[in-house]
Amino acid sequence: LFTPIFAISRVAGWLAHLLEQLENNRIFRPSQIWVGEADRTFVPIEERG
């Protein structure tokens, strides 16, 4: 019962992606470009604050 409920709750998003793909003839994917600070040093949890 969990699986059908899970799928039903996601159908709107899946349909939106399908319609977007049909319109643009490509799969929608975010660009995933890192915008954070580069080359940060690791700080152990005990030293964070």
Image (spheres, helix red, strand yellow):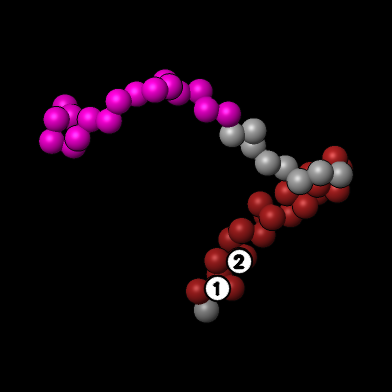
Q: Which residue reaches farthest bottom? A: 1
User: Residue at left 52%, top 79%?
Assistant: 1
Q: Which residues are magenta?
A: 33-49
Q: Are marks 2 and 1 in contact (CB under 8 Å)?
A: yes
**Which of the numbered marks, if any, corresponds to residue 3?**
1
Tell me residue 23's x, y (percent): 86, 43
User: Residue at left 19%, top 35%?
Assistant: 44
> Measured along the vertical axis of the image, is residue 20 above or below residue 49?
below
Q: Main secondary structure of the magenta part?
A: loop
Tell me residue 27's x, y (percent): 76, 46
Task: Name the residue that disc number 2 marks.
Answer: 7
Q: Dot 1, crowdedness within 10 Å: few (<14), some or many (≥20)? A: few
Q: The residue tagged with tag 2: helix, strand or loop?
A: helix
Q: Amino acid at mark 1?
A: Thr
Q: Amino acid at mark 2?
A: Ala
Q: Is residue 43 magenta?
A: yes
Instruction: Measure how far apart labels 2 and 1 are at the Cα level.
Output: 6 Å
Residue 21 vs residue 38: left or right? right
Q: The residue tagged with tag 1: helix, strand or loop?
A: helix
Tell me residue 4's x, y (percent): 59, 73
Query: Which quarter shows the C terminus?
Result: top left
Residue 20 vs residue 32: left or right? right
**Which of the numbered marks, if any, corresponds to residue 46?**
none
> Measured along the vertical axis of the image, is residue 16 above or below residue 44?
below
- In the foreground, 23 or 48: 48
- In the foreground, 35 or 2: 35
> Measured along the vertical axis of the image, is residue 10 above or below residue 27?
below
Q: Is residue 1 magenta?
A: no
